[in-house]
Image: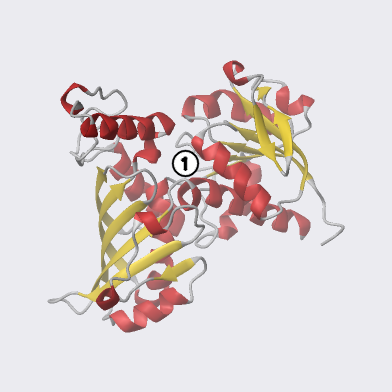
Amino acid sequence: MLNRKKYNVAVVGANGAVGEEILTILQEIDFPINKLVPLASARSVGKKVDFNGKEINIIELTNDVFAKEEVEIALFSAGGSVSAEFASDAVKAGAVVIDNTSHFRMNEDVPLVVPEVNPEDIAKWKQTGIIANPNCSTIQMVQTLKPLDDAYDLVRVDVSTYQATSGAGKTAMEELVTQMQDFFAFKLSDSEHKVFNQQIALNVIPQIDLFTENGYTKEEMKMVNETTKIMHKDIALSATCVRVPTLRGHAEALTLTFDSEVEASEARELLSKAPNIVILDKPEEALYPMPATCVDMNETFVGRIRNDNYSKNMLHMFVVADNLRVGAATNAVRIAQKWVEMEGEK
């Protein structure tokens, strides 16, 4: 619409891995921006971001910057401690906060949203002024679960993840690259690991985040708790989250148990019609989802869809998405789009 309202939009952590993706996506979809306000810590002041062909100075994130810049939408992607300190300032300034960290996710007054799954929850934003973006591995999973749950009544999920180093930030990606360079220089044994507690090059690490008392990691319990909140349903879920030596793209092997019998061909057809899901499922042609083919994509890719050999109410499948996009920036921007749409309907 030519006369649609335009908004003053702040991106907190504008020069981080997710912040950069948010800026790219805002440009790609021509989000209705009146003024872009890129925010970061004091050490980033003086740097610039490229946006719509212009260089824009990064502004220091302070408690009063949201009011000064008259921010209306604030996209946070700079870590939980930053959100904890500054999100309330954005809300007080009149902005809606869309937070990409885990800080607010399980606050019962804060909606946790995947627009393809529970867009109606966005309407609850006024309770706190904040909308939370789920964990990267949760987002692509629930996008896949929703249409199947509607059709067959999902009762249990068993998931193993294969999560890229970018999920731990830019320095984690750099650590993988450095270790691989050291490997080819025959120096891998001397290579340091600081981001991860183990060597990541030529390795997989069956730990993401800290372990809890029940033997699961915090990352695994995020998937359990966030899925329940997003889908408004107590689904038995067990996750094993593994860090793998790829740069971008999280993969998940899903085993789904339903209350009714299910056919893989029918499930494949249902998923093909679901929003922002792409079916890649011709294994005889070596066509299936892989991290290397999902980079810079805004869709979730599903393949290897098959019935269980023993139970007629079980399905298995493989799900892949770009974690910096679908698992973070794209979902945040889609929330903002839906919020704008809902505000425009008033």
Relative horizontal placement of residue 346, taking residue 39 as reference (left or right): right
Disc 1 is placed on an element classified as: loop
Would you say 115 lies left or right of 48 here?
Answer: left
Looking at the rendering, which quadrant does residue 130 occupy?
A: top right
* Residue found farthest to the right: 3
Which x, y percent locates residue 145? 38, 65
- Nearest to the observer: residue 303 or residue 134: 303
Name the one closer to the observer, 197 or 177: 177
Looking at the figure, which quarter contains the C terminus?
bottom right
Residue drawn at x 77%, y 29% is 69
Across and down, in percent, residue 291 comes to 36, 54
Q: Give x and y (percent) for residue 152.
A: 35, 76
Residue type of the residue flagged with mark 1: Arg
Q: Residue at x 72, y 28 (%)?
A: 66
The quarter of the displayed image where residue 234 is located: bottom left
Residue 212 can be seen in this image: no
Residue sitting at x 37%, y 67% = 302
